Structures are given as structure tokens and as C-alpha cells.
Image (spheres, rainbow, N blue to C red):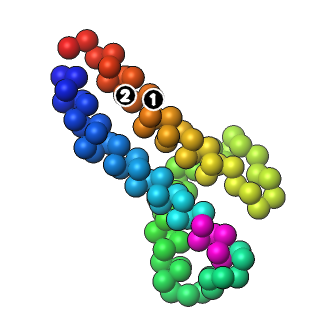
């Protein structure tokens, strides 16, 4: 059972968490580029990328935004979400798998 859970983690859960981190980073960088005026907000490609990333990131950040304060334009919930994903991927899930008795 432990081998099955380990394989599930290595071949499915870990890559999905990695892709989620990439989507969060793209969302943050695109937001910075829009704020800096490098990319136009009304560009259809930019709008589609931001809507796609926002549809994935916003539901995950919503509970964290209720807890964490906003510091002006800085959104700490995205940083906290990346830390939580890293903790799950690097420590919590492998530790839980190792605790399976058989």
C-alpha cells in the first residue's frame, strides 16, 4: 500500500502541485507586468491568461485572504499559498505516506 501511495505521489500529486505553483507564479508576474504598464490589460491574450490563472488561483486564495491582511497592493495570500504547497509537497504528504503501516 505504501508503494502505491508513493507512486501516486511521485507521478501524479507532486507534478500537479508543481504545475499549481507555476500557475501562481505566472499569475503574479502577469499582474506585475500589467501594473508596470509593460503588458496592456485589454490585450485579449493577456486577458485570457489572467482569467485562466485567476480561475485556478482565486478559489484557493480566498480563504487565505480572509485571514491575512492586505498590505496595499501586496497580496500575501499568494505567497502563503506557495509556502503551503511547498510544505505539502516537501514534507507533509511524504510524511503521511511513510506513516502508512503496510
**Secondary element at tag 1:** helix
**Secondary element at tag 2:** helix
Residue most extreme to the right: 72
Q: Is residue 51 left or right of residue 30?
A: left
Image location (x, y in percent) of residue 15: 34, 49
Q: Is the Cβ of the residue at disc 2 closer than 8 Å to that at disc 1?
A: yes
Q: Give the class, few, some or many, for how many residues have Cα within 10 Å of label 2's Cα (few <14, many ≥20).
A: some
| Rendered position, 46 above or below 32 | below
Q: Is residue 93 left or right of residue 67?
A: left
Residue position marked by numbered label 2 in the rendering:
94
- Residue at 66% of width from left, 82% of height from top? 38
Residue position marked by numbered label 1 in the rendering:
91
Q: Nearer the viewer, residue 75 or 64?
A: 75
The magenta segment is 29-34
Q: Nearer the viewer, residue 61 or 23?
A: 23
Residue 37 is drawn in which quadrant? bottom right
Quadrant that contains the N terminus: top left
Q: Nearer the viewer, residue 78 or 51?
A: 78
Image location (x, y in percent) of residue 78: 61, 52
- Residue at 27% of width from left, 45% of height from top? 12
Is residue 63 at all visible to an observer of this figure?
Answer: no
Amino acid at each position: 500500500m505504501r508503494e502505491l501511495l508513493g507512486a501516486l505521489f511521485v507521478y501524479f500529486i507532486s507534478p500537479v502541485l508543481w504545475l499549481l505553483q507555476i500557475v501562481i507564479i505566472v499569475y503574479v508576474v502577469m499582474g506585475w507586468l500589467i501594473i508596470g504598464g509593460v503588458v496592456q490589460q485589454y490585450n485579449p491574450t493577456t486577458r485570457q491568461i489572467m482569467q485562466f490563472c485567476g480561475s485556478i488561483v482565486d478559489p484557493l486564495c480566498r480563504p487565505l485572504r480572509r485571514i491575512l491582511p492586505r498590505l496595499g497592493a501586496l497580496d500575501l495570500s499568494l505567497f502563503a499559498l506557495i509556502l503551503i504547497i511547498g510544505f505539502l509537497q516537501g514534507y507533509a504528504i511524504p510524511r503521511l505516506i511513510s506513516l502508512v503501516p503496510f
